[in-house]
Image (cartoon, rainbow, N blue to C red):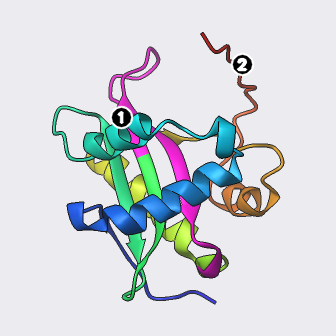
Amino acid sequence: MICQIDVRDVEPEDREDWLKLWEGYNAFYERLGPTALPSAVTDMTWARFFDAQEPVHCLVADDGDRVVGLAHYIFHRNTIMLGPTCYLQDVFTSEQARGRGVGRALIDAVYDRARAAGAMRVYWHTHESNATARGLYDKIAERSGFIVYRRDL
């Protein structure tokens, strides 16, 4: 069932609701307890949303009663396009909001923001085990075929 939601830029008064979702997102990826993000990272992430010099942005989905989803996205340059590209870093909805069109509404809003900024592409990663989200992603985007490598330093 699709619910009526408003996707909008995060506002300072959304901090408590955003924090609950952020903690849920991090718990989903097993960043909790001894592997939890330091509070300084969370505080800096929050501050970046309100700094006009930062390329990091946050949208929230509001169902009229509360914030039920978040999307963090970043604009950056690349070597194969003239304009910016948009990296959708985080998408998360509350457990109660899942299956109601919130994730799709958030991603569609990121698409709109990216178009308005002159970006020609939005891309993101998800864990291969995230079958529920991948069901949505397979409907609204194409898999690039690239494998992600990383090394913590």
- Between 46 and 97, the one lying in front of the other is 46
**Residue that appears at 71% across and 45% down:** 30
> Of circles 2 and 1, which is in front?
2
Please give the range of residues in magenta: 73-96
Badge 1 marks a residue whose secondary structure is: strand
Residue 95 appears in which quarter of the rendering? bottom right
User: Is residue 119 in view?
Assistant: no
Residue 119 in percent (x, y) is at: 36, 38
Direction left: furthest residue:
52
108 on left or right of 52? right
**Residue that appears at 22% across and 60% down:** 12
| Marker disc for residue 149 | 2
Residue 5 is a magenta residue? no
State the residue position of label 1: 75
Residue type highlighted by circle 1: Phe
Residue type highlighted by circle 2: Tyr
Q: Residues within 10 Å of mark 2 (few under 14, many from 20)?
A: few
Residue 121 in percent (x, y) is at: 47, 39
**Residue that appears at 71% across and 25% down:** 148
